[in-house]
């Protein structure tokens, strides 16, 4: 279906520019994606609306349900300073003093807000991936001496187990590699050590849950992955966060769209070498960074049809090169949010069984089977 989407867009562009387009479709499966390939994120940052949103909202539930089958990834920059105040009265959060409502400001996740978030995933039939806090404020104060404190994450797991709330998968840390420089001075072994500790905790509390990571960001991700992956084991998937840099001036520029090929090349090659048993994921992808105010910056194309071409192209490119899962940033919040954007139509098209054929295969080899309903017509009785 990704192929069909991109083909239609290319044809529209060709007509508009009086150009000719030749498309060749080769037989056979190029690669196989998850049924949930086109999925979505909820950003935990305050400036993306996480603390203000009502997750029991019926319209939000309808939007999440419409994207089925999919996976909800909860994570983002605010995730690494989020405290889980799940006990009655949230005593864990007494020391949390938010200074504002930006990317990295500390926040508290109490039991009622958590339960509504979990119910959103459960009621919409969405597989839930929860990003656990790395404790970035403490990490930046302590630098290379930092050792992840597992106590708050432990209370989260206890809460889930006591209420029999299942979670499909967990991550630990969000773009920790972007904090390798002073003053934070974080290193791959520090995140790897935290991952090992957390892995044992998850195995004891929710053994069915998958482990995903390290959710590397833009700053020297290859160096980070090379230092991190040899030190960990048992990852179901390896994730990387990429923003395409799309705006109103370059959204239909083939050279700009093809820039992802270099990143896809080294990323897939590195993972197949260092983590051959793990799936390759796009863990947080968007047309461009939203910025602290969420507007996506100058000449922004976010929230317009202009980014739909990038989205369809990126879905297809990564499926073609072996990506099993694609987590779009994000469902709501910044201008790039799917509920604020025309890109939701691309996601809906991919996840639907809109094709009339009995079975069809998209660019990534994801097979979508649809049984045709036989139409029966009743013959009118002659009077």
Image: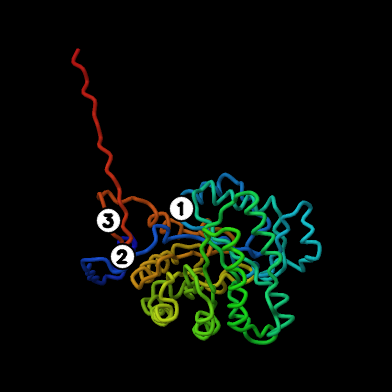
How many numbered badges does the structure rendering display?
Answer: 3
Density class for disc 3 (Cα within 10 Å; few <14, some 14-19, many ≥20) is some
Is residue 286 visible in this depiction of the protein?
no
Mark 2 and mark 3 in contact (Cβ < 8 Å)?
no
Helix or strand or loop: what does disc 1 sit on?
loop
Density class for disc 2 (Cα within 10 Å; few <14, some 14-19, many ≥20) is many
> Which residue carries the number 3 mark?
360
Q: Earlier in the sequence, mark 3 or mark 1?
A: 1
CA–CA distance in space, label 3 to label 2? 10 Å
Say which mark, if any, is on residue 363.
2
Reply above or below: 122 against 361.
above
Which quadrant of the structure image shows residue 377? top left
What is the residue that sits farthest to the top in this orientation?
383
Say which mark, if any, is on residue 205.
none
* Residue 138 horizontal side relative to residue 160, left or right: right
Reply above or below: 223 against 174.
below
Q: Who's the residue at 81% across and 62% down the image? A: 94
Mark 1 and mark 2 in contact (Cβ < 8 Å)?
no
Q: Who's the residue at 67% across and 54% down the image? A: 159
Front-most of residues 71 and 5? 71
Name the spot of residue 14 as percent of width and height, x first: 29, 68
CA–CA distance in space, label 2 to label 1? 19 Å
Name the spot of residue 186 as percent of width and height, x first: 64, 83
Q: Which of marks 2 and 1 is nearer the N terminus?
A: 1
Say which mark, if any, is on residue 67.
1
Name the spot of residue 116 as percent of width and height, x first: 63, 49
Reply above or below: 163 against 20.
above
Image coloring type: rainbow
């Amino acid at each position: 279906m990704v192929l069909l989407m991109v083909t239609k867009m290319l044809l529209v562009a060709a007509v508009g520019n009086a150009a000719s387009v030749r498309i060749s479709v080769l037989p056979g499966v190029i690669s196989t994606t998850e049924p949930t390939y086109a999925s979505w994120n909820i950003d935990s940052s305050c400036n993306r609306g996480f603390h203000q949103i009502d997750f029991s909202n019926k319209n939000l539930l309808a939007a999440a349900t419409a994207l089925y089958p999919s996976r909800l990834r909860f994570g983002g920059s605010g995730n690494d300073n989020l405290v889980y105040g799940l006990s009655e009265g949230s005593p864990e959060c007494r020391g949390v003093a938010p200074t504002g409502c930006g990317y990295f400001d500390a926040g508290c996740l109490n039991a009622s807000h958590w339960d509504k978030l979990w119910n959103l995933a459960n009621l919409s039939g969405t597989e839930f991936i929860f990003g656990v806090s790395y404790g970035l404020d403490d990490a930046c104060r302590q630098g290379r001496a930092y050792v992840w404190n597992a106590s708050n994450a432990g209370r989260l797991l206890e809460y889930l187990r006591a209420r029999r709330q299942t979670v499909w998968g967990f991550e630990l840390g969000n773009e920790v590699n972007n904090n390798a420089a002073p003053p934070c001075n974080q290193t791959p072994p520090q995140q790897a050590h935290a991952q090992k500790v957390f892995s044992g905790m998850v195995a004891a509390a929710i053994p069915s849950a998958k482990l995903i990571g390290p959710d590397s960001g833009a700053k020297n991700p290859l160096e980070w992955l090379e230092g991190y992956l040899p030190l960990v084991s048992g990852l179901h998937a390896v994730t990387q966060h990429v923003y395409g840099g799309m705006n109103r001036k370059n959204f239909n520029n083939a050279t700009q769209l093809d820039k992802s090929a270099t990143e896809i090349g080294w990323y897939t090659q590195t993972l197949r070498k260092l983590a051959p048993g793990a799936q390759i994921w796009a863990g947080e992808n968007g047309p461009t960074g939203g910025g602290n105010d969420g507007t996506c910056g100058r000449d922004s194309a976010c929230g317009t049809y202009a980014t739909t071409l990038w989205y369809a192209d990126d879905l297809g490119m990564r499926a073609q090169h072996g990506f099993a899962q694609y987590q779009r940033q994000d469902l709501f919040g910044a201008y790039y949010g799917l509920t604020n954007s025309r890109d939701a139509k691309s996601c809906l098209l991919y996840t639907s069984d809109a094709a009339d054929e009995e079975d069809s295969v998209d660019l990534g080899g994801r097979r979508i089977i649809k049984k045709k309903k036989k139409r029966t017509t009743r013959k009118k009785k002659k009077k």
